[in-house]
């Protein structure tokens, strides 16, 4: 019961703020709505019992990536609003309609293709080890190679971002 | 009773909102942020299934998705800044330097 | 029901009141300590030896006129001080103030919440607090606050990496992410982590100074530089919130240093037999004394050292502290495996 209330409230807030992200006039407001959206997604992860992913979502996504977006939005602060020029060939309404078609398709797959619904609950008490220990064990034993490759990826991205934004190439 | 279908629907709607954002908006930073919404929708899916199957693999995969999103955001914003220095615009309809 | 709702609410009220009063008197303490270092007396007029000075300050800030400049983004301008203050206050939810006490037949643990990712929670709320500074600088619609806000937040996110890396080495030593677990690990190994991880302690104190925009890293808000920094256009109660947030952050950094490195609520010298009478001192008094000693260190550093230039500051953060913290993690890992 409490879980249902929490889930519906969080989903309404997540989807509401997501709509605000794509419809806000000012870019800075969009970025702020994105931060709040990510915080509510982190709360949803806590509801699902994934506390480590929730905290990483707040630290990395909401507290790192979106700060980067905010910095760039402020650095490209323009006098002329960016949406002034409109390409005649753009078919924005067709794009939105296609997105709705994708949504209907996915919902149909979710309803008709799903076999045997079972309750989803956060069961931290039932597990012998905590969530952080489980994720950590799996990350360092079964998935060690992807872990190291991810660190290589981040190194490459860091070097790439620095090279791209230097003034004197 | 909250079944995984509920989480699937939530992530599908968030995915669709992200796609609408990519298609409709012309400000390239908003387009990149809509891509982040899409990645979050996928993460919600992964974590929901991980909770249902009581296996932490989904959460490990979600961590990798967050890591890739960070790399992509850094490089993407670097490209935007480099482009902005050459041509003072962030309107994606005006970013057509290749055809003159 | 009572255990789930009423007791945490009472704890929250206690903690918030305590924090706010401590912050008020911390401002006075800072002025007094700086004055005594500089061979003068500090505030002496209001109340005996200036003890009622914080009350006068609070009254002044409350009745000051609330000026909002034209053409600011009103929602963001109003929200920025709140976004800076709230994360600083909610970080107190995981700090263990003491062990267990027995009151009215119940065992009450002197912490609001003991979550299994406590240390990461503090890092998370610190990274949310950065937004308030950027938004305060941007929404003031003025050049100096914008520059100062961007500078200050760049400093914060740089030193956040160094802080998190030192926390990783403490987590490796303790084996758990929960704050209570770390103190209990210190109790079990009978030695404070300040002696096991001295380099981590030094890096944490330096990076903590930079995280809270304190001297010698307070260029973004120094009066001689960018006018008033990111809070130039704020006056009255809004400025008071920024001020509160800075001192609350200082208390958080000190409390985390106490918990991680100085044994939290444990008494010193647990092995020495003839100090048995120290056991009668309540655990929260040990915690408070240790936190105040670390706070005094912060005030002392402010009164002593000159300020770093911004490029020197960033150089220290990226080129000195982060490699040292990484080396510390590697050495800790090797020692943990070999022993």
Image (cartoon, coloured by chain):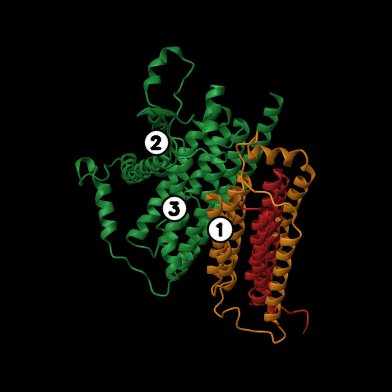
Colour that chain B carries in the picture: red
- The chain drawn orange is chain what? A
Q: Quadrant of residue C254?
A: top left
Colour that chain C carries in the picture: green
Reading the image, the residue beneath label 2 is C292
First in sequence: mark 2 vs mark 3: 3
Q: Do the residues marked 1 and 2 share a common chain?
A: no
Q: Chain of mark 3?
A: C
Vertical arrangement, residue B85 with respect to residue B51, above or below? below
Name the mark on residue A43: none
- 3D distance between C-alphas at marks 2 and 3: 22 Å
**B96 lies left or right of C7:** right
Crowding at label 2, few (<14), some or many (≥20) Cα neighbours within 10 Å?
some
Residue in front for this viewpoint, A116 or B76:
A116
Q: Quadrant of residue C104?
A: top left
The reply to whether discs 1 and 3 touch (Cβ–Cβ < 8 Å) is no
Q: Chain of mark 2?
A: C
Vertical arrangement, residue B37 with respect to residue B65, above or below? below
Vertical arrangement, residue C201 with respect to residue C162, above or below? above
Reading the image, the residue beneath label 1 is A8
Reading the image, the residue beneath label 3 is C86
């Amino acid at each position: 019961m409490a879980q249902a209330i929490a889930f519906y409230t969080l989903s309404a807030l997540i989807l509401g703020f997501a709509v605000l992200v794509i419809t806000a006039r000012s870019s800075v407001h969009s970025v702020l709505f994105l931060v709040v959206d990510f915080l509510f997604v982190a709360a949803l992860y806590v509801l699902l019992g994934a506390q480590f992913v929730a905290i990483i979502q707040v630290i990395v996504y909401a507290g790192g990536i979106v700060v980067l977006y905010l910095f760039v939005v402020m650095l490209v602060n323009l006098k002329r609003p960016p949406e002034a020029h409109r390409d005649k060939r753009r078919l924005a309404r067709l794009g939105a309609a296609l997105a709705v078609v994708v949504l209907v398709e996915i919902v149909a797959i979710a309803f008709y293709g799903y076999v045997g619904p079972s309750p989803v609950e956060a069961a931290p008490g039932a597990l012998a080890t905590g969530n952080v220990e489980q994720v950590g064990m799996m990350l360092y034993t079964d998935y060690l190679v992807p872990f190291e490759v991810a660190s290589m990826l981040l190194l490459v991205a860091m070097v790439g971002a620095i090279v791209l934004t230097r003034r004197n190439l | 009773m909250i079944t995984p279908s509920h989480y699937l629907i939530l992530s599908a709607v968030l995915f669709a909102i992200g796609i609408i954002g990519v298609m409709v908006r012309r400000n390239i930073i908003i387009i990149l942020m809509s891509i982040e919404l899409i990645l979050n929708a996928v993460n919600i899916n992964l974590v929901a299934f991980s909770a249902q199957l009581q296996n932490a693999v989904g959460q490990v995969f979600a961590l990798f998705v967050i890591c890739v999103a960070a790399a992509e955001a850094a490089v993407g914003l670097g490209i935007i800044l480099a482009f902005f220095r050459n041509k003072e615009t962030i309107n994606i309809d005006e970013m057509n330097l290749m055809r003159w | 029901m009572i255990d789930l709702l009423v007791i945490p609410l009472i704890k929250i009220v206690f903690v918030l009141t305590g924090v706010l009063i401590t912050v008020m008197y911390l401002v006075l303490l800072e002025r007094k300590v700086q004055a005594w270092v500089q061979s003068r007396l500090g505030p002496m007029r209001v109340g005996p030896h200036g003890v009622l000075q914080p009350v006068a300050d609070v009254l002044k800030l409350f009745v000051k006129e609330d000026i909002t400049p034209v053409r600011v983004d009103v929602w963001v301008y109003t929200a920025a001080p709140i976004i800076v203050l709230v994360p600083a206050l909610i970080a107190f939810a995981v700090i263990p103030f003491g062990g267990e006490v027995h009151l009215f037949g119940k065992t009450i643990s002197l912490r609001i919440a003991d979550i299994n990712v406590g240390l990461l929670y503090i890092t998370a709320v610190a990274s949310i607090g950065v937004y308030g500074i950027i938004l305060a600088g941007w929404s003031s619609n003025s050049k100096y606050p914008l520059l100062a806000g961007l500078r200050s937040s760049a400093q914060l996110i740089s030193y956040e990496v160094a802080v998190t890396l030192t926390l990783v080495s403490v987590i490796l030593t303790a084996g758990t992410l929960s704050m209570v677990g770390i103190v209990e690990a210190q109790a079990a190994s009978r030695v404070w982590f300040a002696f096991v991880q001295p380099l981590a302690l030094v890096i944490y104190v330096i990076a903590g100074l930079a995280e809270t925009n304190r001297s010698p890293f307070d260029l973004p808000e120094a009066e001689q530089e960018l006018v008033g920094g990111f809070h130039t256009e704020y006056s009255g109660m809004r400025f008071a919130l920024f001020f509160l947030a800075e001192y609350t952050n200082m208390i958080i950094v000190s409390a985390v240093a106490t918990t991680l490195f100085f044994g939290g609520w444990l008494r010193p010298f647990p092995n020495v037999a003839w100090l048995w009478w120290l056991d009668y001192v309540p655990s929260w008094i040990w915690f408070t004394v240790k936190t105040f000693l670390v706070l005094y260190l912060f005030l002392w550093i402010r009164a002593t050292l000159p300020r770093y230039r911004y490029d020197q500051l960033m150089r220290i953060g990226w080129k000195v502290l982060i490699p040292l913290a990484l080396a510390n993690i590697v050495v800790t890992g090797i020692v943990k495996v070999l022993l």
